[in-house]
Image (cartoon, grey):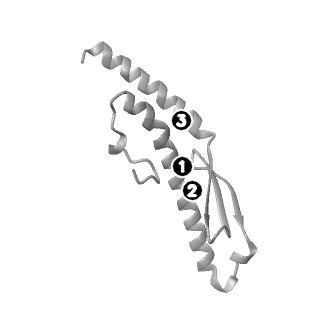
Amino acid sequence: MDFTKMMQMASQLRDQLGLAQSEQATTEVTGEAGGGLVRVTMNGKYEVLKIDIDAKAVDVSDLHLLEDLLRAAFNQATTKIGSSMRDKLDGFSKNLGIDLSMFKFPGSEG
């Protein structure tokens, strides 16, 4: 492959990454735990937008349960964001012949 073609591919990759990051920033995902007793909504920049806690999840004698539910909801939302970003990048990366499996997105398992 010649140098000019490599530079064109690098430029395409940079443009596509920028577009994917812009789109990802406006993505919202919700992680939940306890059958919906706790919900955490985050955007694609991993910022927490909203936390919903059903009163049934609050038992002052067992705060560890609420902590576990919150942790599980946060982890699920984080995984969804990582998967979303990986999915966005997967399409164009294959067109450029790039294997994304070597990259680990936060929260993703791919």
Q: Kindly state the secondary structure of the residue where label 3 is placed.
A: helix
Q: Kindly state the secondary structure of the residue where label 1 is placed.
A: helix
Q: Which residue is mark 1?
A: 81
Name the image quarter holding residue 66: bottom right
Q: Residue at x 61, y 50 (%)?
A: 47
Q: Residue at x 72, y 77 (%)?
A: 56
> 34 or 15, which is in the foreground?
34
Name the image quarter holding residue 90: top left
Q: Residue 58 appears at what percent x and percent y?
A: 70, 77
- Calculate the distance from the C-alpha at mark 1 to the C-alpha at mark 2: 6 Å
Sequence-earlier tag: 1 or 3: 3
Q: Residue 27 appears at what percent x and percent y?
A: 61, 43
Q: Which residue is mark 3?
A: 21
Q: Amino acid at mark 2?
A: Ala
Sequence-earlier tag: 3 or 2: 3
- Calculate the distance from the C-alpha at mark 1 to the C-alpha at mark 3: 11 Å
Q: Which residue is mark 2?
A: 77
Which quadrant is the N terminus positioned in? top left
Q: Is residue 47 left or right of residue 105?
A: right
Tell me whether the residue at label 1 lies in contact with that at label 3, contact meaning CB atoms closer than 8 angstroms: no
